[in-house]
Image (cartoon, rainbow, N blue to C red):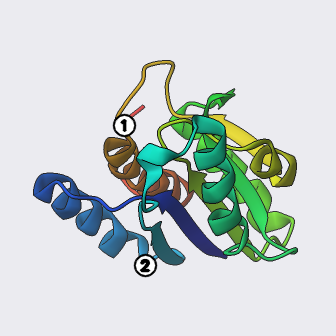
Amino acid sequence: MKITLIAISKTTEKYLQDGIAIYENRLQHYCKFQRVEIPDLKNSKNLSFDQQKQKEADLILAKISNTDFVVLLDENGKEFNSLQFSKEISKWQNQSITHVVFIIGGPYGFDQSVYDRANLKISLSKLTFSHQMVRLFFVEQLYRAYSILKGEPYHHQ
């Protein structure tokens, strides 16, 4: 299964870049993983929040095909613990889903068109984190899910 993480804006903090790189490297043993960063919008200060979300939506939707299984990382999404998340990934594999696209939106969330395209919304926590930190948390949880599926000792229950 191929997994893509689409995120608005670049990861600028070195410690986050380093952490993300560690888990992305580990993920290569389990799946085809790629991260796509969509650059910040130019002149976003001249746009309303809704206009900004719409422009980001156009850029996001251009990166997704009709056959992709789309999962939004959204504060109002379904919450999973690590074991449940690994079972969800296993379920997708058993359903022969070939490409799962996870999306981290911009600071104002998603435009309705992105919600309409999504197959699922998940929340990593009820807490609010910076969009850059969410990338690290997500790739670590994805690695953890695969290590659980493989019966490896990374996750302790």
Image quadrant holding the C terminus, namely: top left
Q: Nearer the viewer, residue 148 or 142?
A: 142
The residues bearing labels 1 and 2 have C-alpha atoms spaced at a distance of: 20 Å
Query: Camera-side residue: 13 or 84?
Result: 13
For residue 119, side relative to residue 3 (left or right): right
Give x and y (percent) for residue 53.
63, 46
Residue 87 location (% of width, % of height): 68, 47
Task: Give me the residue at 59% from left, 55% from top.
Answer: 103
Q: Bin the neighbour count of mark 1 within 10 Å (Cα to Cα): few under 14, some 14-19, many 20 and up.
A: few
Q: Secondary structure at mark 1?
A: loop
Above or below residue 135? Residue 35 is: below
Name which of mark 1 and mark 2 comes first in the sequence: 2
Q: Position of residue 151 (x, y in %)?
A: 48, 56
Apparent side of residue 10 relative to residue 86 in the rendered image (left or right): left
Residue at (37, 31) in percent of width and height:
129
Q: Please state the horizontal and vertical placement of residue 70, each as a whole percent of the image.
A: 74, 58
The residue singled out by tag 1 in the image is 156
Give the residue type that dot 1 points to: His
Q: Which quadrant holds residue 56? A: bottom right
Q: Can you tell which quarter of the image residue 121 is in?
A: top right
The image shows residue 42, relative to residue 127, as above or below, that is: below
Q: Name the residue rendered at 49%, 25% in the picture.
A: 125
The residue at 64%/64% (across/down) is 60
Towards the viewer: 96 or 38: 38
Quarter of the image that includes the N terminus: bottom right
Residue to which mark 2 is pinned? 29
* Residue that extends furthest to the top in the rendered view of this protein: 126
* Residue type at numbered disc 2: His
Kindly indicate the quadrant of the structure image that contains residue 28: bottom left
